[in-house]
């Protein structure tokens, strides 16, 4: 029986991928490499470290350990400048409503994000008080598709993984939920998220009980 919901952040609750893109593209430009929106798509759900390593590989550039650390810090400063102006208007359609439906149904809710900036973002969009647990890149070490982030979320809610339902927009995130023996709703394209138990294009108009829980 589903007793808890774990939400990914970027791509499910807010669209911060556009801000990651601007910051990574600025870094790539300074390093003299190209960085496309298609490449940015492949960074969804990937950690900051994993992202810079991919950009280095795509751009065929080498950086020392110290330079990697420095660029990650600079990229994050630029990213923080973008998210500093976020407000409730940036919550993706249907996300607040699904959270409300979960709470009205007496379900516990956790965040399960790769981001180290999740608390800042949830504060900016005024959703931070809705969560019973916040598990993000500051508390877990293994990246999705490792299930650590979701298993930690389930544990913090005091629930077995089988009683948790994950909402994810990234392939690695869907795999992480499956690896953790949880039910997972893919939010996005079935071409990318085909392993999920249910795939929906977005959260708009979704009835949590009828459209998801009863069918999963
Ligand atoms: C998010 C984004 C990723 C980003 C990662 C780390 O994951 O989808 O693109 O690289 O967080 O973010 P930060 O640099 O803020 O620590 P999620 O799991 O919320 O989709
Ligand atoms: Mg995501």
Image (spheres, helix red, strand yellow):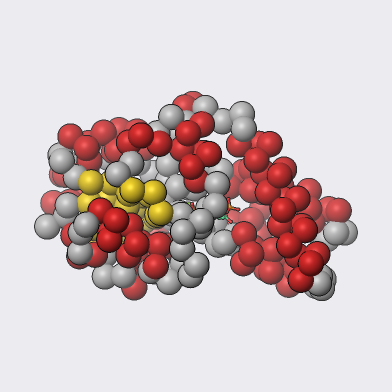
- In the picture, measured across the screen, residue 212 lies left or right of residue 81, that is left
Q: Residue at x 17, y 52 (%)?
A: 3
- In the picture, measured across the screen, residue 160 lies left or right of residue 74, that is left
Rendered position, 39 above or below 21? below
Rendered position, 107 above or below 127? below
Q: Residue at x 73, y 72 (%)?
A: 57
Between 76 and 216, the one lying in front of the other is 76
* Residue 90 placement (x, y as % from top left): 50, 31
Q: Residue at x 54, y 52 (%)?
A: 116
Q: Is residue 64 visible?
A: yes
- In the picture, measured across the screen, residue 50 lies left or right of residue 63, that is left
Image quadrant assignment for residue 181: bottom left
- The quadrant of the picture occupied by the N terminus is bottom left
Q: Residue at x 25, y 53 (%)?
A: 157
Rendered position, 75 above or below 68? above
* Residue 103 placement (x, y as % from top left): 22, 37
Q: How many marks?
A: 0
Image quadrant assignment for residue 70: bottom right
- The quadrant of the picture occupied by the C terminus is bottom left
Q: Is residue 93 visible?
A: no
Between 52 and 21, the one lying in front of the other is 52
* Residue 202 placement (x, y as % from top left): 38, 44
Between 125 and 89, the one lying in front of the other is 125
């Amino acid at each position: 029986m589903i007793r808890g919901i774990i939400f990914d952040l970027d791509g499910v609750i807010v669209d911060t991928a556009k801000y990651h893109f601007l910051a990574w593209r600025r870094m790539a430009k300074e390093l003299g490499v190209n960085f496309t929106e298609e490449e940015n798509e492949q960074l969804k759900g990937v950690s900051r470290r994993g992202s810079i390593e991919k950009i280095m590989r795509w751009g065929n550039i080498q950086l020392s350990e110290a330079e990697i650390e420095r660029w990650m810090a600079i990229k994050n400063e630029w990213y923080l400048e973008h998210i500093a102006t976020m407000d409730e208007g940036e919550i993706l359609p249907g996300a607040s409503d699904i959270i409300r439906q979960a709470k009205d149904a007496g379900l516990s809710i956790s965040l399960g994000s790769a981001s180290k900036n999740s608390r800042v973002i949830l504060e900016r969009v005024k959703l931070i008080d809705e969560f019973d647990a916040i598990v993000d890149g500051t508390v877990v070490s293994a990246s999705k598709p490792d299930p650590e982030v979701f298993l930690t979320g389930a544990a913090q809610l005091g629930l077995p993984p089988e009683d948790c339902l994950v909402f994810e927009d990234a392939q690695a995130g869907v795999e992480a939920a499956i690896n953790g023996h949880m039910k997972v709703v893919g939010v996005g394209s079935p071409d990318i998220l085909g392993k999920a138990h249910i795939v929906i294009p977005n959260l708009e108009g979704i009835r949590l009980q009828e459209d998801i829980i009863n069918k999963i």
